[in-house]
Image: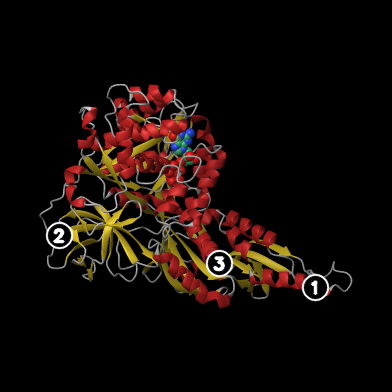
């Protein structure tokens, strides 16, 4: 890359970008060149022509295919790098009408607008893994530059992965279709917790791993330090590390040639009966269910009859193609290729992720599927206004069409009426789902305190999984005799000066230290076993705040451990509110109870009568607050006879009331429920 780097220093960014665009199709180590080199024209033509109208996939045998993912800790630049590779291969237009380089948000809306939500854009995190096919002419084996036209074209499938702990399930799903991965590490931040987790996911899947040290344009970038970390933690050779800036384009010309050189082609058999892995699915209003698939063996054509190994259901392939990056019909998909099919499935529930699809006329050995998504957090969702139940039902159905990782069952609460118990991959996943319900479907939702799946044993010898405190029996003849809670193994990486506060936080959260070592002279690495309950509620935010944002955190689920659990009830004016009950460790019950009643006191307005708020374990009250009586008259300050103003105030009050939930005689604002979610 020497010549390109030298040249780049003298170029303005726009020119530099077009140079990059051009040069990407040539050997990275070839002789020096000048800006008016005739090579630029040749290659640029290729790029601008790469969005072919009709794509003939037949020429892409497995040797000319590379399937790879980009994995990284959150914000290390996966999506930016993905965008730049798409630009570089002409898969999307450079700039896309934007003055600056594309970032993932613009590209995301360009890709699967059906899948992506405003929430994702708003939060700047990738929630849903995305796939795109690129065509790339590569003459990388040192052939003469004049051979550029004859250089073989490769079909590259890039699978972007989400970067938040809640979605590590999506990461492993993406990796199943890949033979290699770009492990992106920020040149300033170095190895972080998810770098470790993602490395091991890729390593255990036997993927070729290409380390990419990104953000080298940052003034404080220290690629040498990061190389040393990668060597000491993962035994990755410093000489194998690519140095890039996805922002300025520096070093990007090495990425795709390295993908072709270092990642093996897919190994399936073209002449074997068809076996295809169902990677993902989403619902499109016009086309119906669209499945993302990887063809492991054989060939699939439009019109073929296929069956699901999991359900035995049979379908006919009505449309088939690649994501380039929009759906581009090709009529066929061959061994090693990744693409989409539309086959008349009615709902994404029929499209089981990890399922093997095959020609109906053959029976095949199913491929190893994925571990099903585990629901780590459960919460009740209720319409703020009981009469909106059908609307909420409809909104949830629409949303789960595109997010099959949410589990939904109907439930009822004596306080909140009819609602749903939903299972999520984690707290962020839950927040995103709520926000989408409100933003995209205008639903006003009350959610109950999140719980994790506990196991309880009763005096009659029975055992049950409990995802809802209301499921605990009130019958005195069926007492709880033992209880277990799920735990996780958490990896935490922090600058050494924060070790003390982090140890304190973890022990407050009932953590047990398993490992304590150093990434390098400045950063510590710790492993803790923590009860899942303790991390779903605000652990990450607190960890970030006590470490000035420098901590990185990841977790994987682990075993159940026996634990002394109790049900904590909230009682309003003598009436127990089932929707506010929670399950806590006995030792924490006092503190949590106190916090809950204090929060409620803050959020419940004074009413015309006195309100008592109590936290109780069984019959024993452990915390109590009182809100004294007061009549709230919105017209009190409205002197004179301005009828319109009075009406406006009353309407405003009525609107506010809609967001209130009446429990017994007490009006509770929606925000009070939201606040309870944050009590750990
Ligand atoms: N200076 C600099 N900033 C970069 C570079 N690459 C990405 N960024 C910025 O880093 C931030 C995060 O980049 P993303 O590409 O969104 O990171 P990500 O890893 O995809 O994040 P998630 O999707 O949330 O996991 C954005 O503000 C980018 O503009 C780079 O090479 N240099």
The mark that comes first in sequence, 1 or 3, is: 3
Q: Is residue 632 above or below residue 63?
A: below
Q: Which residue matches tag 3?
A: 442
Q: Residue drawn at (46%, 70%), measured in percent from left and top?
A: 471
Residue 264 is situated, as x and y percent measured from the top left of the image, at 20, 40
Q: Quadrant of residue 589?
A: bottom right
Q: Which residue matches tag 2?
A: 365
The mark that comes first in sequence, 2 or 1, is: 2
- In the image, which is nearer the foreground, mark 2 or mark 3? 3
Q: Residue drawn at (47%, 57%), measured in percent from left and top?
A: 117
Distance in Å between CA atoms under marks 2 and 3: 46 Å
- In the image, which is nearer the foreground, mark 2 or mark 1? 1
Element assignment for label 1 = helix
Residue 413 is situated, as x and y percent measured from the top left of the image, at 53, 74
Element assignment for label 2 = loop
The residue at the far right in this view is 640
Q: Is residue 276 visible?
A: yes
């Amino acid at each position: 890359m020497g010549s390109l780097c030298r040249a780049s220093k003298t170029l303005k960014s726009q020119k530099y970008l077009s140079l990059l665009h051009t040069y990407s199709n040539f050997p990275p180590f070839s002789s020096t060149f000048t800006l008016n080199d005739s090579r630029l024209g040749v290659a640029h033509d290729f790029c601008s022509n790469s969005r072919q109208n009709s794509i003939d996939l037949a020429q892409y045998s497995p040797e000319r295919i590379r399937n790879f993912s980009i994995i990284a800790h959150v914000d290390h630049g996966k999506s930016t790098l993905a965008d730049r590779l798409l630009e570089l291969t002409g898969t999307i237009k450079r700039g896309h009408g934007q003055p600056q380089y594309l970032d993932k948000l613009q590209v995301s809306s360009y890709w699967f607008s059906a899948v992506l939500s405003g929430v994702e854009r708003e939060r700047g995190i990738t929630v849903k893994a995305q796939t795109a096919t690129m065509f790339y002419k590569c003459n990388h084996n040192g052939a003469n530059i004049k051979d550029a036209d004859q250089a073989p074209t490769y079909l590259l499938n890039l699978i972007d992965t989400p970067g938040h702990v809640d979605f590590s399930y999506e990461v492993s799903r993406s990796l199943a279709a890949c033979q290699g991965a770009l492990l992106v590490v920020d040149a300033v931040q170095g190895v972080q917790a998810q770098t470790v987790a993602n490395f091991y996911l890729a390593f255990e899947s036997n993927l070729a791993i290409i380390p990419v040290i990104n953000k080298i344009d940052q003034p404080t970038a220290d690629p040498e330090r990061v190389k040393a970390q990668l060597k000491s933690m993962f035994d990755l050779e410093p000489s194998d590390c690519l140095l890039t800036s996805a922002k300025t384009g520096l070093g990007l010309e090495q990425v795709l040639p390295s993908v072709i050189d270092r990642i093996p082609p897919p190994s399936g058999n073209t002449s074997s009966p068809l076996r295809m892995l169902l990677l993902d699915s989403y619902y499109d209003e016009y086309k119906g269910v669209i499945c993302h698939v990887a063809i492991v063996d054989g060939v699939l054509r439009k019109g073929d009859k296929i069956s699901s190994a999991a359900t035995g259901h049979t379908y006919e392939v009505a449309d088939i193609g690649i994501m380039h990056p929009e759906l581009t019909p090709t009529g066929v998909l061959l061994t090693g290729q990744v693409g989409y099919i539309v086959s008349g499935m009615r709902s994404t529930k029929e499209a089981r992720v990890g399922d093997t699809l095959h020609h109906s006329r053959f029976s095949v050995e199913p491929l190893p599927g994925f571990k099903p998504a585990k629901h780590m957090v459960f919460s009740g969702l209720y319409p703020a206004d009981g009469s909106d139940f059908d609307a909420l039902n409809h909104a949830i159905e629409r949303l789960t069409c595109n997010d099959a990782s949410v589990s939904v069952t109907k439930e009822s609460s004596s306080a909140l009426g009819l609602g749903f118990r939903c299972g999520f991959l984690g707290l962020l996943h839950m927040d995103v789902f709520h926000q989408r319900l409100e933003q995209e479907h205008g639903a006003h939702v009350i959610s109950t305190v999140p719980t994790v799946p506990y196991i309880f044993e009763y005096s009659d010898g029975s055992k049950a999984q409990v995802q809802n405190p209301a499921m605990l029996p009130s019958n005195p003849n069926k007492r709880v005799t033992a209880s277990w809670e799920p735990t996780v193994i958490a990896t935490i990486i922090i600058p050494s000066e924060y070790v003390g506060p982090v140890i304190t936080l973890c022990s407050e959260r009932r953590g047990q230290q398993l490992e304590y070592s150093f990434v390098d002279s400045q950063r510590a690495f710790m492993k803790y076993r923590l009860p899942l309950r303790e991390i779903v509620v605000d652990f990450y935010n607190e960890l970030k705040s006590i470490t000035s944002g420098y901590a990185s955190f990841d977790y994987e689920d682990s075993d159940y451990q026996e634990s002394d659990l109790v049900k904590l009830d909230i009682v309003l004016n003598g009436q127990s509110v089932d929707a506010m009950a929670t399950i806590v460790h006995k030792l924490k019950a006092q503190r949590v109870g106190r916090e809950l009643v204090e929060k409620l006191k803050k959020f419940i307005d004074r009413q015309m009568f006195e309100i008592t708020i109590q936290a109780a374990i069984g019959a024993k009250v452990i915390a109590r607050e009182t809100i004294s009586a007061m009549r709230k008259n919105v017209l009190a300050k409205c002197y004179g006879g301005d009828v319109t103003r009075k009406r406006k105030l009353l309407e405003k009050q009525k609107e506010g009331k809609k967001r209130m939930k009446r429990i017994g005689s007490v009006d509770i604002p929606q925000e009070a429920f939201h606040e309870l979610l944050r009590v750990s």
